[in-house]
Image (tube, grey):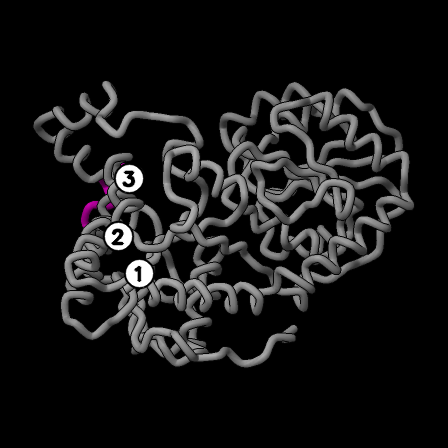
Amino acid sequence: MSSLPSPNLAGLPRHLLFSICARIGGSGLDSDSFECLKASYGAGILGLAVAYDNRQSVIPAKYIHSLRWHPVRLLSGLGSKYYYGAKKHALAKVAAKKLSSGKYDLFHSWAGDCLETLRVSKAMGIPSLLEIPTWHRNKGVLKPDRLTKSERVLAQTKGFEGFRNRLLVTRQMQLEEYELADIILVLSSKAEETFLTAGVPKEKLFSLPRGTDPNRFTPGSFPSIFRAVFTGALIKRKGVHTLLEAWDKLKLKNAELVLVGAVHEEIKPYLERFAGPSLRLTGYVKKPEDLLRQSTVHIFPSTCEGSAKVTYDAAACGLPQISTHEAGDVVVDGLNGLVVPCNDVDSLAKAIQHLYDNPSLVTQMGAAARQRIVENFTWDHYRARLLDAYRLAMQRV
């Protein structure tokens, strides 16, 4: 669904350098980065993207520098968190070398992926944007800029363990990224709030909510039973344990809770405790839209997100949602769903009961959810906002 005009090229950079430790065109963050690159490629300003891999064919391969065969892969046996950090450091080094060539006039990357590249960007006077997938590293809590006790222990460890620790992306590194970037892209009002609390000037922040494909995610028909669905990793951070307790407390008749996503170890005790005939687990599914179209309400009581993509997808499918302020800004309380405090079993149960008791409200909020997406949160809207962010960064030179 493309309802926006072709981009206005005025004020845009000539050659953008983009970097991300993701597979362009995969799923999750990988698909978001692909949509991001489509904005610059469509505007004719993409110079090069440095990424961990390339899994798409829309953007010609000459624009993607893949690290698929980079020597950093030899470190994969060190353990996931150390290898994860090593990949990010390798990406930053490659991107820094590319930026040093003088071919690019704007740099865009993601938090944790680009400290060395941002240092080069600042030294060369090349404007930069830093995208934040969740919140400020301090998560809205005031912390000293100096090393904490645990951070000092990590930094002072020697030998092989010290070598592995130096591969990690530390809080101090990310704080330096925040300082070096000219523009910080935040996904929601809650994410912005965490940066303001940490003392980052508001004028340095640019709101860039995500998008979805309303042609793929379309409304279905409400089922004959009250079917609540959760989509995402089954972990505490996303409030799954709170949802399970609230659902068990209600004992609703002719109702079903469907959990869509990979089960993590930390949530297994809750699944055992609250198991019952009204609870169904599907595991990971490739086409979540099929389950969304067969549901009554989407519930996503997360405690920490940038702006959860599943909330965009569910809204596009015409589902009212019960969510939290911490999950993003897609749900407007009373318009297209209900917003409850995170980690609050009673409030969540009350919201579920309210929609269960009011099917006409479900229909009304579902229609409003779809309309809000079509009018504000398609990938076309996202790309238009991103180009505006590029224009703003170019004005900061």
- Residue 84 magenta: no
Q: Is residue 121 above or below residue 81?
A: below
Q: Amino acid at mark 2?
A: Cys
Distance Cα–Cα, label 1 vs label 2? 8 Å
Q: Amino acid at mark 3?
A: Leu
Question: Residue 40 falls in which quadrant of the image?
Answer: bottom left
Numbered tag placed on residue 19 in the rendering: 1
Mark closer to the chain start, 3 or 2 = 2
The answer to which of 17 and 359 lies nearer the viewer is 17
The residue that appears at 56% across and 36% down in the rendered structure is 326
Q: Which residue is mark 2?
A: 114
Q: Is residue 117 above or below residue 158?
A: below
The picture places residue 82, in percent across and down from the top left corner, at 25, 38
SS assignment for the magenta stretch, majority: helix
The picture places residue 342, in percent across and down from the top left corner, at 61, 28
User: Helix, strand or loop at disc 1?
Assistant: strand
The picture places residue 390, in percent across and down from the top left corner, at 39, 66
The picture places residue 77, in percent across and down from the top left corner, at 23, 41
Q: Is residue 383 above or below residue 199?
A: below
Mark closer to the chain start, 1 or 2 = 1
Distance Cα–Cα, label 3 vs label 1? 18 Å
> Are discs 3 and 1 less than 8 Å apart at CB?
no
The answer to which of 248 and 117 lies nearer the viewer is 117
Q: Which residue is mark 3?
A: 175
Left or right, 2 with respect to 208, comes to: right
Q: Residues within 10 Å of mark 3 (few under 14, many from 20)?
A: some
Q: Which residues are magenta?
A: 74-80
The answer to which of 117 and 10 lies nearer the viewer is 10
